[in-house]
Amino acid sequence: MNTYRIKTPIIPEQLEELKAGDKVLLSGTIYTARDAAHKRMINALESHQSLPFDLENQIIYYCGPSPAREGLPIGSAGPTTSTRMDTYTPTLLAHGVKMLIGKGERSQVVIDSLKKNKAIYLIAIGGAGAFYANTVVSSEIVAWSDLGAEAVYKLEVKDFLCFVSEQMN
């Protein structure tokens, strides 16, 4: 197992070295999105509308953060189960997303789409929301604030720990 420090924006060539089990420390911008936000993204893309943020070479973290306590950029920010996003994932990958972060296994359709689009699925540690919140330097809602915790947040992170999924082999 190797350790890689990756800064965003993602440069696709950075992903070529990553192997299942590798440890990745991300720094830079990542976007949160859960079920409701995914549905809105897909509806917008299918209607040929632009999104409020660019998907090209981006990272989507399956997370619905809790509200920040006073003086902190975010509350708990742990991963949610990834399979709930499987229906939407191939379309987002086709639109340029290069990394997905969540917990749990992915469907064969998603695995095939990751390979086709030269993207990577990273595993975050379940139950570690407070740990991940400590890696967040800043946080802002960039889309669909009416969704509350399921809005799309733009997070600036430093040394956000995750692992390349075993399913990537």
Image (tube, rainbow, N blue to C red):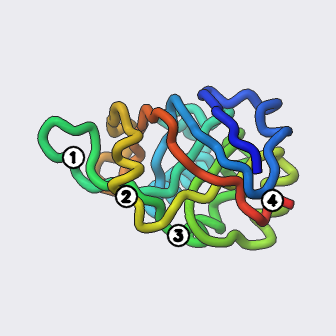
Q: Residues within 10 Å of mark 1 (few under 14, many from 20)?
A: some
Quarter location, residue 54: top right
Residue 16 versus residue 60: which sits nearer the camera?
Answer: 16
Q: Earlier in the sequence, mark 4 or mark 3?
A: 3
On the image, numbered disc 4 is attached to which residue?
Answer: 168
Q: Residues within 10 Å of mark 4 (few under 14, many from 20)?
A: some
Foreground: disc 3 or disc 2: 2
On the image, numbered disc 3 is attached to which residue?
Answer: 81
Look at the numbered disc 1 and give the secondary structure of its residue: loop
Look at the numbered disc 3 and give the secondary structure of its residue: loop
Point out which mark residue 129 bears.
Answer: 2
In the image, is residue 13 above or below residue 25? above
Residue 32 picture location, percent across and down: 46, 48
Point out which mark residue 21 bears.
Answer: none
Residue sitting at x 66%, y 58%: 89
Q: CA distance from mark 4 to mark 2?
A: 24 Å
Residue lying farthest to the front in this orientation: 1
On the image, numbered disc 1 is attached to which residue?
Answer: 68
Residue sitting at x 62%, y 37%: 58
